[in-house]
Image: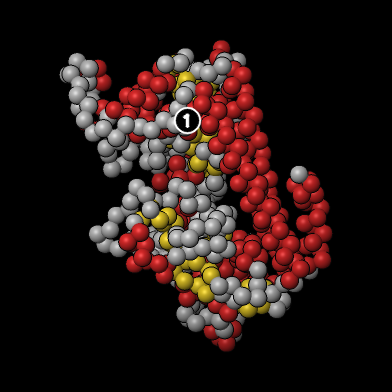
């Protein structure tokens, strides 16, 4: 009767060992979990709270709001299994920061998301900011002593760190990883020289990522310079008088926000050069919405808006069963192909990402699939178009169209009317080259973090010498560059 079932026999003393919360559920004692932990305890190890301080972040106090300018407030979405990025973080006032300064986070702090569906995202801070606050949905590991923070970061991202995160997470509807459990994580104590090598990899990865971002910014600047928009500052004028004929009759919109001068100004600037509507440049294909009843742990990866940025796609945590599509040909119909541009129309609208190669994904109905028309592929480069869609030229059009609602929705009919500048093909090629080099460096950055993570696993399973040889054989090209 027990055929096919997993069973682990443990003494009560073993069950209670390092189990201060007294859990006795079978999930906590899965054989795979125990096997991973056995690899760790074969080495010298310490618990995390003996290596550094583990502290929580802080919820925005009741009645307080974010500011347009001020001190960055790091959220869970700014912490995505790599380097923490504050550029898109909301801001809080100096006065509020002074009340929350004990929740400051700074260089070489390690952040771990411990609430919600992003539990287990581990990032490290490599920027230098005098002031920066942290959300309550993340914990920070600070004041690390006698161990290299870059090693701790890489270990937590390894399978030996992730298994402890998974094992200690409780709840389903709103998963949570208690700070007390995190403090008890087991950390292998590996040789200092090896940890220093991990630090080199992480630093090199960060350098490549920063260069990647700089190249992308250069590409954006080429576009804006060509359109005379480098120093463009949108109007702050709150009043714009329009006749009924030039407003509602023309657009069907009566909301005052739609007619702000700043939107008119940027459209006029773009229209002073050659341009066209998006609908005349691309084929637009809607995606699929299978419904949450069809979400699964097995099947084809299901990419949603939360998985997309202009720099790439994150690994989805949801799949759709292959059986849902009723056959491979039907599945192919819904899958984006090489050079397809994904564009978000719901939630966070106006994010565009170009698919670089063949994929085995399907996307949610909140993402449109855009492909440049065959007869225009020599006139409009897809990499150029993607950058335009992510630029302020289009983001302001999206803001105008979709603004004013609690949950933003950018209608496909509005997206078709988006104004796209048509710059000379030589300028497009310059932009494309910089974007491609940017993505090449970003990929190298990700690969270096993967090498660091894998080498930690090898050091645990074998020894540091074998791990160092693995590093050398997998980073020769990146280090030479």
Left or right of 384 in this view: 477:
right
Residue 313 visible in the picture: yes
Say which of 330 and 40 sits in front. Answer: 40
Please identify the residue farthest to the left as the structure is shown.
244
- Describe the element under mark 1 as helix, strand or loop: loop
Please name the residue shown 55% across and 40% down the image.
311
Q: Vertically, is 378 above or below 67? A: above
Percent across and percent down for residue 34 are 62, 72
Query: Disc 1 marks which residue?
Result: 230
Percent across and percent down for residue 110 are 55, 64
Q: Badge 1, how many Cα within 10 Å: few under 14, some, many 20+?
A: few
The image's colour scheme reads: secondary structure
In the rendered image, the quadrant that contains the C terminus is: top right
In the rendered image, the quadrant that contains the N terminus is: bottom right
Identify the image quadrant of residue 278.
Answer: top left
Say which of 40 and 102 sits in front. Answer: 102
Q: Vertically, is 224 above or below 32? A: above
Please name the residue shown 65% across and 68% down the image.
148
Please name the residue shown 31% across and 41% down the image.
407
Residue 172 visible in the picture: no
Please name the residue shown 23% across and 33% down the image.
238
Please identify the residue farthest to the top as the structure is shown.
375
Q: Vertically, is 356 above or below 423? A: below
Please identify the residue farthest to the bottom as the structure is shown.
13
Say which of 73 and 171 sits in front. Answer: 73
């Amino acid at each position: 009767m027990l055929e096919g079932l997993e069973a682990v026999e443990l003494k009560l003393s073993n069950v209670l060992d390092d189990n201060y919360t007294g859990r006795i559920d079978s999930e906590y004692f899965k054989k795979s979990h125990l096997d991973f932990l056995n690899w760790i305890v074969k080495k010298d190890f310490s618990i995390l709270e003996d290596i550094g301080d583990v502290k929580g972040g802080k919820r925005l106090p009741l009645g307080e709001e974010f500011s347009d300018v001020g001190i960055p407030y790091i959220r869970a979405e700014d912490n995505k299994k790599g380097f923490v990025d504050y550029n898109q973080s909301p801001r809080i006032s100096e006065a509020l920061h002074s009340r929350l300064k004990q929740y400051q986070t700074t260089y070489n702090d390690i952040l771990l998301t411990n609430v919600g569906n992003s539990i287990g995202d581990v990032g490290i801070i490599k920027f230098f900011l005098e002031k920066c606050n942290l959300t309550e949905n993340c914990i920070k590991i600070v004041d690390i002593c006698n161990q290299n923070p870059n090693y701790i970061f890489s270990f937590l991202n390894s399978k030996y760190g992730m298994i402890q995160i998974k094992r200690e997470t409780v709840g389903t509807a709103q998963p949570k990883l208690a700070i007390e459990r995190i403090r008890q994580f087991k950390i292998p104590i590996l040789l200092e020289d090896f940890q220093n090598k991990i630090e080199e990899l992480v630093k090199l990865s960060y350098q490549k990522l920063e260069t990647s971002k700089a190249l992308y910014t250069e590409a954006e600047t080429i576009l804006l310079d060509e359109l005379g928009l480098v120093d463009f500052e949108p109007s702050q004028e709150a009043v714009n008088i329009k006749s009924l004929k030039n407003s509602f009759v023309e657009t069907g919109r009566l909301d005052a926000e739609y007619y702000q001068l700043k939107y008119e100004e940027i459209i006029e600037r773009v229209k002073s050069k050659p341009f066209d509507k998006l609908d005349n440049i691309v084929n637009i294909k809607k995606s699929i919405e299978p419904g949450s009843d069809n979400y699964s742990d097995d099947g084809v990866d299901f990419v949603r808006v939360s998985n997309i940025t202009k720099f790439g796609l994150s690994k989805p945590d949801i799949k759709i069963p292959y059986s849902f599509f009723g056959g491979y040909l039907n599945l192919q119909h819904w899958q984006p192909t090489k050079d397809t541009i994904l564009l978000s129309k719901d939630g966070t609208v106006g994010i565009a990402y170009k698919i670089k190669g063949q994929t085995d994904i399907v996307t949610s109905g909140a993402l449109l699939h855009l492909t440049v028309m065959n007869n225009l592929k020599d006139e409009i480069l897809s990499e150029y178009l993607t950058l335009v869609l992510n630029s302020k030229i289009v983001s302001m059009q999206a803001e105008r169209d979709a603004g004013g609602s609690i949950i933003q929705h950018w209608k496909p009919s509005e997206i078709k009317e988006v104004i796209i500048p048509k710059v000379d093909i030589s300028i497009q090629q310059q932009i494309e080259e910089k974007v491609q080099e940017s993505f090449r460096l970003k990929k190298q950055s990700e690969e270096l973090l993967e090498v660091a993570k894998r080498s930690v696993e090898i050091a645990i399973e074998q020894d540091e010498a074998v791990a160092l040889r693995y590093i050398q054989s997998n980073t020769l090209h990146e280090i030479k560059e």
